[in-house]
Image (cartoon, rainbow, N blue to C red):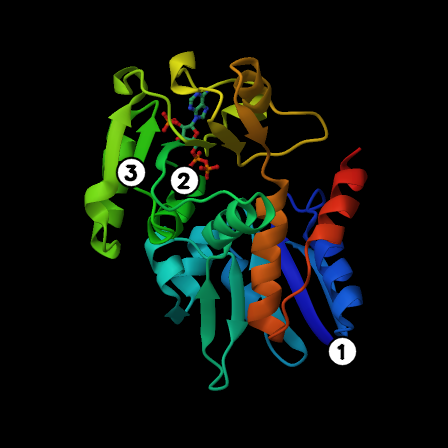
């Protein structure tokens, strides 16, 4: 039977095996999907050992996404721009291929599941680490009018803008900004790609940036609403967490590997229950 993995460290907490098992059941694809504990210094070997014979594909999570990017012989444009790979497979010539489906997962969740019209919107992206980098190009490609990247450390946001501008046709819409210089005009969409929620902390941005029409999206998710979602709702905004993005990035990987697109609504319900 075809075998797939998710590799990371730690890995026991990963929801990917459950998500892909549900996709496989639903689409009647015959496959196994298992977690694999990545070992620092042995990652490349682990990938080469896994992706042979019945080993058909691998998802990659922290802290190996950049190493997976370096290892891939063929990269999608999304992977190239993100500097990180979360989906690996071999093509017909046996070359190791890498894609990054995180940004696609976010945009699909917003547009398809939550009916958000990204086209023409003013968007604020908080954070300038790997999580932010992966979603910039897909947001620009979705036609946002303005994408402001704000980070606690301004220089990292500036580096991100400089790195990604060459990939974007509409790079003039991309700006870097410090939290304190964001002004007071509310955004249509605010995406939290910082890791602040992991510590129950909040990016230090003005409450004026949120109005009743603002959608706030935390790329993190948990059984309880995240600190960022609670903050957004307290300002009168609408809030979503990143569970939908997780499931949609997985659906995109499944499609790359199997050529079959799973339905995600029932999987979303199952995952929400499993979090409780
Ligand atoms: P990831 O790969 O998850 O993006 P990362 O590369 O370590 O992780 O980046 C973490 C991001 O969260 C950074 O943008 C970081 O801001 P700095 O560049 O200034 O460090 C941001 N971050 C983490 N904790 C934060 C907090 N309490 N408030 C605001 N931003 C925070």
User: Residue 233's spot in the image, x, y percent?
Assistant: 57, 19
Q: Secondary structure at mark 3?
A: strand
User: Residue 57's spot in the image, x, y percent?
Assistant: 60, 69
The vertical placement of 55 against 47, above or below, is below
Which one is closest to the eye, mark 2 or mark 3? 3
Q: Secondary structure at mark 2?
A: helix
- Disc 3 marks which residue? 146
Q: CA distance from mark 2 to mark 1?
A: 36 Å
> For mark 3, does the 10 Å Cα neighbourhood hold few (<14), some (14 to 19), or many (20 or more) residues?
many
- Disc 2 marks which residue? 132
Which one is closest to the eye, mark 1 or mark 3? 3
Quadrant housing the N terminus: bottom right
The disc at residue 1 is 1
Q: CA distance from mark 1 to mark 3?
A: 46 Å
> For mark 1, does the 10 Å Cα neighbourhood hold few (<14), some (14 to 19), or many (20 or more) residues?
few
Question: What's the residue at 60%, 78% (across, down)?
Answer: 52
């Amino acid at each position: 039977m075809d075998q797939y993995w998710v590799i990371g460290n730690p890995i026991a907490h990963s929801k990917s095996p459950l998500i892909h098992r549900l996709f496989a059941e639903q689409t009647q694809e015959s496959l196994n999907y298992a977690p694999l504990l990545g070992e620092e210094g042995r990652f490349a070997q682990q990938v080469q050992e896994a992706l042979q014979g019945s080993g058909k594909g691998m998802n990659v999570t922290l802290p190996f996404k950049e190493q997976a990017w370096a290892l891939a012989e063929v990269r999608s444009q999304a992977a190239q721009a993100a500097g990180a790979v979360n989906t690996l497979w071999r093509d017909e010539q046996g070359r190791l291929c890498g894609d990054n489906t995180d940004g696609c997962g976010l945009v699909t969740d917003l547009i398809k599941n939550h009916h958000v019209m990204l086209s023409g919107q003013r968007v604020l992206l908080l954070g300038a680490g790997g999580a932010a980098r992966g979603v910039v190009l897909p947001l620009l490609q979705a036609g946002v009018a303005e994408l402001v990247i704000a980070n606690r450390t301004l220089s990292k946001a500036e580096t991100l803008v400089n790195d990604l501008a060459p990939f974007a046709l509409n790079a003039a819409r991309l700006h870097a900004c410090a939290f304190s210089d964001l002004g007071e005009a509310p955004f249509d969409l605010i995406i939290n790609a910082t890791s602040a929620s992991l510590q129950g902390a909040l990016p230090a941005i003005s409450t004026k940036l949120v109005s009743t029409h603002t959608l706030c999206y935390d790329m993190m998710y948990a059984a309880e609403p995240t600190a960022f979602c609670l903050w957004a709702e307290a300002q009168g905004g609408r809030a979503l967490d990143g569970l939908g993005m997780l499931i949609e990035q997985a659906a995109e990987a499944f499609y790359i590997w199997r050529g079959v697109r799973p339905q995600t609504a029932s999987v979303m319900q199952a995952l929400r229950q499993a979090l409780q």
